[in-house]
Amino acid sequence: MANYDITIDKEKFNLSSKYIASLDIVPIGNQQFHALRHNRSYKIKILNTDFAQKTMTLEVNGNTYEMVLADEYDQMVDKMGLLSTKTHKINNIKAPMPGLIIDVMAMIGQKVETGTPLIVLSAMKMENIITSQGEGIIKSINVEVNDAVDKGQLIIEME
């Protein structure tokens, strides 16, 4: 069972996939949904989504909320203290989990810095944006869209 840390307007919540599945959510239009929880009705509209930063702006019953989603991978990276402001060179980028390549945003020869989006990996019904953890120049890209990858598989080589 997956757990997600969700921060809404600086207040943090931990939600399990079981809890999320228990919500009665029905799409009612373009980026609009109706949710029912404990006999309370909620009209939800997605105003803005930034997949790279895993943020979303929602309107719920007329009130606007900023939401940040941290999946289990983000929580693990944070817990291990891997989020660093130091600049460092990187050699290779490996798949953090098994999944399917949805998008390749990087190009051979591209100079990247910390946080540069490189690959979109679909895993556990979530799209995960793999970003550069340092700086460097892309030497080769070893995957294409629709490729299945294993955890630890080399996906990008750096110079």
Image: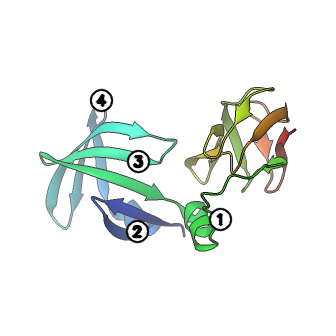
Labels 2 & 3 near each other (Cβ < 8 A): no
Q: Residue at the location (70% across, 30% down)? A: 106
Decide which of tag 4 and tag 1 comes sooner along the chain. 4
What amino acid type is highlighted by mark number 2? Leu
- Estimate the spatial distance between the alpha carbons at disc 4 and disc 2, rounded to whole Å: 25 Å
Helix, strand, or loop for circle 3?
strand
Query: What element does badge 1 sit on?
Result: loop
- Give the residue drawn at x 17%, y 52%: 42
**Mark 3 to mark 4: distance in Å?**
19 Å
Residue corresponding to mark 2: 15
Q: Which of the marked residues, 3 or 4, is nearer the chain's N terminus? A: 4
Task: Judge the density around disc 2: few (<14), some (14-19), many (≥20) Cα neighbours within 10 Å.
Answer: some
Residue 115 located left or right of residue 97 = left
Three-letter amino acid code at the position of disc 4 = Asn
Q: Amino acid at mark 3?
A: Thr
Looking at the rendered image, the disc whose residue lies closer to the viewer, 3 or 1, is 1
Query: Counting other residues with Cα less than 10 Å from the Cα at mark 4, is it few (<14), some (14-19), or many (20 or more)?
Result: few
Tell me: residue 48, above or below residue 22: above
Which structural element holds mark 4? loop
Residue 95 screen position, x and y as percent? 76, 51
Residue at which label 3 appears: 55
Q: CA distance from mark 2 to mark 3?
A: 16 Å
Q: Which residue is mark 1?
A: 82
> Callout 1: few (<14), some (14-19), or many (20+) C-alpha neighbours within 10 Å?
few
Determine which of the numbered discs, if any, sits on residue 30 in the image. 4
The CA distance from mark 4 to mark 1 is: 37 Å
Q: Quadrant of the N terminus?
A: bottom right
Q: Quadrant of the C terminus?
A: top right
